[in-house]
Structure formats: C-alpha cells, structure tokens
Image: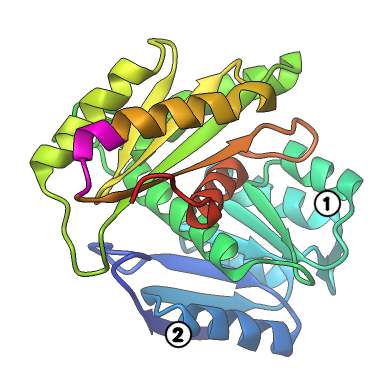
Amino acid sequence: METNFFGASEETSTWAHSPKVLLIEDNPGDVALFKHYLGSAGVKQIELKNVASIAEAEKLLGVESFDSIILDLRLPDADGIEALRRIRRFRQDTPVIILSGNLDTDTASDVIDAGADSYYNKESVRIDSLLLSLKLAIDRSKNSMNTHDNGVDEETGLFNQYGFQNVVEEAFHSACASDSDMCLLWVNMRKDETHVTSMDIIKGVASRIEKSVRSSDYIARLKPSDFLIALPGVGTDRRDQIRSRLLQALSQEVGSELTIQIGCACLDPNSSTLTTLIVQAKNDASVVKSDHA
C-alpha cells in the first residue's frame, strides 16, 4: 500500500482538508501513470492510497473512509462488474470512477447500473476529463459531509455544485428511464489567467441566466465564475439555438470585458452519467469558439 501527496493548481482544487482517494489497481505501470497524471496536472493535497486487489480494498474500506475510489475492473480476485458490486457492498455513497481497459458499450451500461459514477477506457481516456470527474467526485463527497451546506451559493442564490447534483440527479434518472432529452450547458467566463471576475459581474450574469432560461431549468454557480445549467426536455435539435441565444444575452451583460464560451452536452441514456455529462459540457466549452471576444 502506498500513500502519496500531490500538489494542487487553483483550477483543480482548493480543498480545506486533504481529500483521500483509493486507487484499486494491480498493474504497477498503470499506478505510476495515474500518479503522473496527477503530478503533471499540478494536483496537490490529494492523499492517494493504492491496493492491488478487492480483498485488500475491502479490508481497508472497513477501517477508513475515502472521498473517491478509482477502480480497475480486472483484478486478481475479481473480474468485471463483480469488482464494482463488491466495492458497493462496503461503500454505497462513495463516488466510484471506473478506469479500466476494453470497456465495451454493454459493460459500460452495466457499471452505471451497478452504481459507478463515471467510467473511462485506459486506452482512450482524456486526462482532463478524468481529473475533472475526480474533482467533481471529491467536491461532492466533501460537501455531502458538511451539515452546514444547504446546496445554495450564498452570493447568487443559485445552486452550488452539491445542490445542483442532488436535484439534477433525480431529473437525470427520470429522463433516462423515460427516454427523454436533457442537455447541460457549461458557461465559462475568462479574460486571462490572472484576471479575477468581480462579484458584481458574477451576480449580473447569474441574473441574466435566470431570465434567459425556463423556471423548470436548473442553474448552479461553480466557483469562481463558471455556471452550469441543466435543461430537461431539450435535445440536440435545440441546443445550438439555446446556446446562441444565451451567449448573446450574456455578451450584453459583460460587454467586451470578458470572453464567454458555452459548452453543451446532451444525454445519451445508454452511456451517459450526470458526471460524464458535466465533464463533456466543460470540455466542449474549452473547444467551442465564442462569437464574443
């Protein structure tokens, strides 16, 4: 068993206490690679523990709690979905991210049904996506243990990430069960890496977003200055129209002071999780060229 600490960039984390992550992986090369991912991204504060089997994990989970679990599905004493099921017997609420090889569509669907929060193929994983999933999992785990967190962002009155994920989770599962549409929008406001967006602008943008979407939609402020919007019932046929309209409204709010980018991800009931949708929306925001500069 190994314990390592990695340092953190501002974007990745500002946790008050060092988060604990359990990596269940028996391949030393993959363990070293995951450590490299954390180090190359400048992630600090994380306490990473590694075990090489489900038996070791069960023993450890019997005496320690973790903020997130990274799980390989091919281990010496458990293969495939059984590895996840055994972990879930010990920890029902701890976020579990699957990082495994050769995940086909059927297996991916099975791991979501068995309680995984998100999943990635080792062969094709995008490191920024994996690390964002890990950050979301850790933040949610930390907030769920904070009895003073009512799920509301104090500055804007919108949901914070914890509140957003709690309320949207139900809408997400309802959409999956009924084969309905849902899209997520990630709103990114940036000037440059050293610029700090003023609270007046953040509040103005929050108010503008509320006026631009339906009362049935869900909005969260993700600190410091990003926003996340869930749009139940909206599919791929309407996402570009909505994104364009919102971009125009927000551009009027901030003028030329900031660059605004809006990423979008739409539900695929056969492969999406709420976490992967959030990750996809943020990734899309980083590559979609804004009309506003």
Q: Nearer the viewer, residue 40 or 96?
A: 40
Q: Tell me residue 96's x, y (percent).
A: 61, 53
Q: Tell me residue 94's x, y (percent).
A: 53, 49
Q: Mostly what secondary structure, the magenta segment?
A: helix
Q: Against 182, is 72 above or below? A: below
Residue 198 in sight here: yes
Q: Which of the 4 quarters of the picture holds residue 44?
A: bottom left
Q: Earlier in the sequence, mark 2 or mark 1?
A: 2
Q: Which of the 4 quarters of the picture holds residue 31?
A: bottom right
The total of numbered circles placed on residues is 2
Q: Nearer the viewer, residue 95 or 260?
A: 260
Q: Tell me residue 212's x, y (percent).
A: 35, 19
Residue topped by disc 2: 4
Image point 20% across, 69% down: which residue? 194
Mark 2 is surrounded, within 10 Å at the Cα level, by few (under 14), some (14 to 19) or many (20 or more) other residues, namely: few
Q: Are marks 2 and 1 in contact (CB under 8 Å)?
A: no
Q: Tell me residue 168's x, y (percent).
A: 49, 26
Q: Against 5, is 63 above or below? A: above
Q: Give, as a single range, the part of the protein colored magenta.
A: 251-256
- Res 81 label: 1
Q: Against 143, is 63 above or below? A: below
Reply yes or no: does residue 62 show up in magenta: no
Image point 24% across, 36% down: which residue? 149
